[in-house]
Image (cartoon, rainbow, N blue to C red):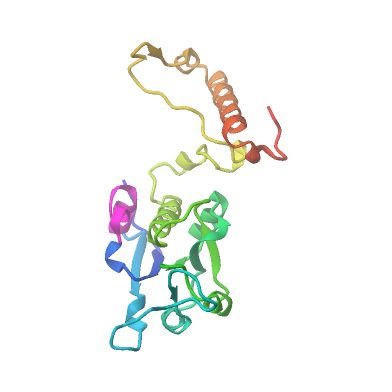
């Protein structure tokens, strides 16, 4: 059961052209229950409210020519001016630094985040420079806007907040976790029945020998990491 927070809730503030998208998946399961219990809070800000013309225009053609439109510094800057400087300012962008578990842990340990969701070809660079925005990317691909990326970042933070998971140790052996597992990919999981379609649970997991089970899991994590993410093994022991 999720426990109520004795302190101020962790706050996710989102600047977007589509506030109606939220909470979306964040309103369900672990994140939804944690929000209902007051462990975190969600605030959305409609960027278009800061447009000054009758058409509520937020974008313009790119300087120097090219396809698409760019969100203007005047509108986006005014939206950012309206929010307190009480949390990291993050712009979700495919050219940003890759989002890592370690960064999620840092953000979860703070009071919250302020996320700017771009659209079209992006936002005027001067906004990024003026507000010293931290640019973060989910990976080497492009989405239609920053909203899905914002949800992913928030979900990754919320599940790390104290009181959200019944067992705080639940995150310690996950993929990319630190500690004894050193950022390896997670080992395979199995559950009953013992045999399914001719495939059986590895005997070691049924042995009751916790030392051997721990060794098997560690070996499996190492092997999966070697196969799929050898970059994570740089500078780490190979066994």
Residue occupying the far top of the picture = 198
User: Is residue 33 covered in magenta?
Assistant: yes
Which residue occupies the foreground of this view, 47 or 105? 47
Image quarter where the C terminus lies is top right
Magenta stretch: helix, strand or loop mostly = helix
- Seen at 56% across and 60% down, the residue is 96
| Image coordinates for residue 184, horizontal then vertical, percent | 58, 37
- Rendering coords of residue 106 (x, y %): 55, 58
Total residue callouts? 0
Q: Residue at x 42, y 41 (%)?
A: 167
Above-or-below relation of 190 to 153: above
Q: Is residue 14 above or below residue 143?
A: below
Residue 41 left/right relative to 110 = left
| Relative to 75, residue 20 above or below | above
Question: Residue placed at 44% from the left, 53% from the top?
Answer: 162
Q: Name the quarter where the N terminus is drawn.
A: top left
Furthest residue toward bottom: 53
Query: Where residue 177 sits: x, y (%)?
Result: 55, 42
Q: Quadrant of residue 193?
A: top left
Q: Residue at x 49, y 67 (%)?
A: 91
- 119 sits to left or right of 228: left
The image quarter containing residue 71 is: bottom left
**Between 61 and 130, which is closer to the camera in this rendering?**
61
Instruction: Place residue 38 in its image quadrant.
Output: bottom left
Q: Position of residue 73 (x, y in %)?
A: 48, 81
**Which stretch appears magenta?**
22-36
Answer whether residue 167 is magenta in the image: no
């Amino acid at each position: 059961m999720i426990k109520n927070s004795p302190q101020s809730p962790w706050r996710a503030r989102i600047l977007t052209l589509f506030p109606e998208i939220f909470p979306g998946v964040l309103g369900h399961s672990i994140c939804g229950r944690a929000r209902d219990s007051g462990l975190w809070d969600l605030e959305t800000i409609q960027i278009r409210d800061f447009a000054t013309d009758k058409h509520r225009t937020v974008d313009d053609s790119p300087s120097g020519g090219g396809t698409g439109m760019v969100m203007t510094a005047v509108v986006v800057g005014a939206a950012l001016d309206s929010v307190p400087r009480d949390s990291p300012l993050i712009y979700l962008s495919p050219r940003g630094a890759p989002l890592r578990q370690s960064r999620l842990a840092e953000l979860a340990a703070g009071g919250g985040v302020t996320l700017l969701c771009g659209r079209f070809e992006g936002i005027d660079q001067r906004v990024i420079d003026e507000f010293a925005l931290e640019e973060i990317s989910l990976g080497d691909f492009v989405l239609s806007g920053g909203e899905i990326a914002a949800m992913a970042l928030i979900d990754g933070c919320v599940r790390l907040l104290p009181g959200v998971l019944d067992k705080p140790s639940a995150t310690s052996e996950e993929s990319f976790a630190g500690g004894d597992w050193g950022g390896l990919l997670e080992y395979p999981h199995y559950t009953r029945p013992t045999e399914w379609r001719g495939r059986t649970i590895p005997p070691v997991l049924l042995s009751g020998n916790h030392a051997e089970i721990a060794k098997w899991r560690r070996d499996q994590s190492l092997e999966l990491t070697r196969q799929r993410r050898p970059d994570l093994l740089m500078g780490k022991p190979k066994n």
